[in-house]
Amino acid sequence: MGFRKKSKSPPVLSHEFVIQNHADMVSCVAMIVLLGLMFEVTAKFAIMFITVQYNVTQSLDTDAEDKPESVNYYKYGPKDMATVFFYLLIAVILHALIQEYILDKINRRLHLSKTKHSKFNESGQLATFYSLSFVWGCSILTSEEFVTNPTFLWEGYPHINMAFQVKFFYICQIAYWFHALPELYFQKVRKEDIPRQLYYICLYIFHIAGAYVLNLHRLGLVLLVPHYLVELLFHASRLFYFSDENKQKGFTLWALLFVITRLLTLTVSVLTFGFGLSHTDNQGFSLAEGNFNVLTVRMTCLSAICLTQAWMMWKFINFQLKKWREQSQIQASKKKAVSPKSRPNKKDSRGESCLKMHQSLLEDQAK
């Protein structure tokens, strides 16, 4: 881990050296980018990594005789990859800080096994990210009024102009999930857990980047916020379970909200792609205008969402069945363990009576 003091330092540039000091190395790279702002020659390149690019100013017509108000919006472009890279570095640094100063200290108190230790670290990191993203997403939905008027999801498509907080939200989301790929190496994730984590990391990158590039950021926000709430509840419940195995009530609420969120996601997706976008006036495909409102793209997006929801429900059902089988086996083993003790043994009762009679005879003889 980064920022960790070790008594013996491994060889320079070895695997163990990189894993222990990766946060320090990444911090140096981020500092080099920030130092580039101090010089005029490099400031133009450094600012491309730090600030949001492709600013567009639009004037709003008002009824007053004063000058029209100007509003700043943002589009996406190739320079966004530099911004994603910089905030990927920031995500790696924050990941190491949370691991070192919060999760590792809790792990030392709980004395968890290796399997639970890995899952505890995963849930701790994701619970922190989901909670921040959920609060941030709710504030955007409230300010942009996406929830109060569902027709905003398709009216005026293509939605090439984004508010600052919307674009910055997507930049941070893409950067975080890209940072999760090298963290599999930095955190020494077990080989058994790598395929499972790769699946959901790649799915997040695919869906969030797809909504960003296809100018479906409004729909992406509406679907991400409830999904993050459900995932937050799951990982928070798992953290409480690791601290005390009797605390399992959170999983019941999570199971209920999980199914409701899957139905909500399918309903909103079908409504947007099957009804809303198909009936808008601006039909066609144009990369220059950012318009992807054609039947092929709509059906591809809808199919991708439906297949993802079906896969998640399949995993959920298998998880619940496995949990139900484990509980039934535990209850059956308890019944088997209790039943022999509860039944009286005839041989034992006869032996005890003989011993009592023998002791009484010995007492009479002694008298």
Image (cartoon, rainbow, N blue to C red):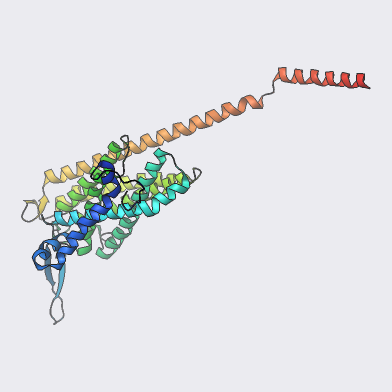
Residue 229 in percent (x, y) is at 35, 52
Task: Tell me residue 207's x, y (percent).
Answer: 21, 47
For residue 106, side relative to residue 10 (left or right)? right
Q: Considering depth in this image, is 222 or 149 the residue closer to the camera?
A: 222
Q: Nearer the viewer, residue 225 or 146?
A: 225
Image coords of residue 178 (percent x, y): 22, 48
For the point 37% across and 46% down, which residue is it?
A: 121
Q: Which residue appears at 30% of the width and 35% of the height?
A: 191
Left or right side of 294 for 202: right
Residue 150 in view in this figure: yes
Q: What x and y, as percent, mark residue 107?
A: 43, 47
Q: Quadrant of the C terminus?
A: top right
Judging depth in this view, the residue of 346 and 102 nearest the camera is 102
Q: In percent of the image, x 32 and y 57: which residue is there?
A: 132
Furthest toward the right, the residue is 367
Q: In the rendered picture of this protein, how many numbered marks are placed on residues? A: 0
Relative to residue 131, is residue 18 drawn left or right? left
Q: Is residue 171 at least partly visible in the picture?
A: no
Q: Which sits in the foreground, 175 or 113?
A: 113
Check the image and report above or below for 94 versus 196: below
Residue extending furthest toward the bottom? 65
Q: Is residue 136 left or right of residue 151?
A: right
